[in-house]
Amino acid sequence: MPPLQPLEFRDCVVDGPHFRSALQNHEKELKAHGKLVKGVYNNAERVFKAMDELRDALGSFAASLTAYCTANNASPPLSARSQEDSDKRGSAEVAETDDEVTIKTAFIEFAKIIHAVEDARSMMLTDPKDFLKETTTFCQKLEKYLSVKQKERTPEVILW
């Protein structure tokens, strides 16, 4: 769209056709921008709702991973063992393979990471002041630690 012509006060006083057409153009642009702003607002609301649903879904996913991996050892193993092999051995317990143990521990660690990320995200959203306060204190401690370490490592040499 071409840029709008500025509305001049002297044209307003005269109230000519040029001023009225310029005013109508400004009103049309204002309505168009109002619609765009409403669209942005509605999309932002949808994004925030989707973020809440994602947070809930990730939490339940992590909980189900943890529940699956910490279930009793009587659950069927992950590898595909035939029923005939277990019938031949009787009621002996089947030990998990190293791969199954590795997969279960990986699932548990993944669930812990998801919980940690979601806890941090919820803390940032619910208590932004507390989050900023904790972040600044952490950064100050880190800067202090780094300055102490730097002083210890670099020998003081005076070049004159």
Image (spheres, rainbow, N blue to C red):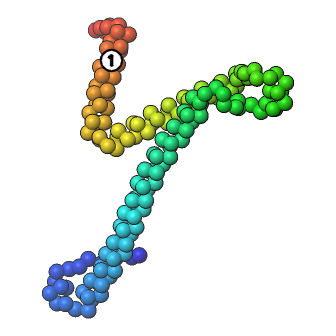
**Quick one: 93 or 9, which is closer to the camera?**
93
Above/below status of 151 relative to 56:
above
Image coordinates of residue 51 in percent, x first then y, are 44, 50
Quarter where residue 73 is shown: top right
Above/below status of 42 relative to 67:
below
**Quick one: 142 or 100, which is closer to the camera?**
100
Quadrant that contains the C terminus? top left
Horizontal side of 118 relative to 13 (left or right) equals: right
Q: Tag 1, which secondary structure?
A: helix
How many marks overall? Answer: 1
Quadrant that contains the N terminus? bottom left
Quarter where residue 34 is shown: bottom left
**Quick one: 2 or 44, which is closer to the camera?**
44
Any part of residue 68 in sight: yes
Horizontal side of 69 relative to 91 (left or right) equals: left
Image coordinates of residue 125 in percent, x first then y, are 34, 44
Above/below status of 127 relative to 70:
below
State the residue at coordinates (48%, 41%): 59
Image coordinates of residue 48 in percent, x first then y, are 41, 54
Image coordinates of residue 114 in percent, x first then y, are 49, 36
Any part of residue 106 in sight: no
State the residue at coordinates (54%, 41%): 61
Task: Name the outermost residue toward the front.
Answer: 91
Pointer 1: residues within 10 angstroms few (<14), some, or many (20+)? Answer: few
Horizontal side of 36 relative to 54 (left or right) equals: left
Quarter where residue 74 is shown: top right
**Quick one: 116 or 77, which is closer to the camera?**
77
Above/below status of 92 relative to 127:
above
The residue beneath circle 1 is: 145
Q: Given the image, on which type of amino acid does mark 1 rest?
A: Tyr
